[in-house]
Amino acid sequence: MKKFVLLSVLLLLFSLFNACEEEEKNLLLGKWMLQLVTYEYYEDDLLVDSGMTSYYDFKYLEFFKGGEGNVWLDKIEYDTFTWRKDGKTIYVDEGTENEQVIEINELSKTALVFTITMEEEEGGVVYRHIHEITMSKVD
């Protein structure tokens, strides 16, 4: 009897976890408009520039069921991508050799805040760019 109760509790907890993950994934679906970008640029762990802007490479991101998405420059559909979500991380593939890794800081019905960190080494110097992007739900 104890094994049955334990198994039932474990199944319930597992289903709740999966339901929360699916609900959060569904929150991501739709079109998001860029609001604010804060950035920090480092060279060998030395901060060389930081600031905020409302301008970025894109104006909107759109996530569809099935792992497809669009990048919009104002009212022009600029590019497509595929995506998958694992916990608080979104992996975006734009057809280049490297996936873009996006760490979700906040996700609600109206707000999406995420961080993108890019790092490369050139000439013995490590360049790191950290962008925190704040978006609002359009539809």
Image (cartoon, grey):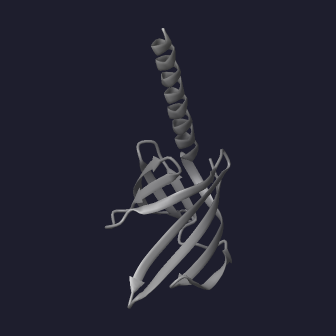
Residue at figure coordinates x 53%, y 50% from the top left = 88
Which residue is at the front of the view, 54 or 15? Answer: 15
For this rendering, which residue is in front, 62 or 113? 113
Q: Is residue 104 left or right of residue 52?
A: left
* Tag count: 0
Q: Is residue 95 left or right of residue 133?
A: left
Outermost front residue: 2
Instruction: Look at the picture and state if 123 lies above or below 3.
Output: below
Q: Measured from the top left, where is residue 126 in percent x and y? A: 45, 83
Seen as rendered, the residue at the extreme left is 97
Above or below, comparing residue 98 to residue 47 in the picture: above
Q: Where is residue 13 drawn, in percent x and y?
A: 53, 27
The quadrant holding residue 32 is bottom right
> Viewer-proximal residue, 111 or 88?
88
Q: Identify which residue is drawn at 39% across, 87% down.
A: 122
Q: Residue furthest top?
A: 1
Residue 101, position as x, y percentages in the image: 46, 61
Q: Nearer the viewer, residue 31 or 20?
A: 20
Q: Position of residue 120 (x, y in %)?
A: 42, 79
Rendered view: 21 above or below 138: above
Look at 55% across and 29% down and name the residue there. Answer: 16
Residue in the image at 47% along x and 46% along y? 64
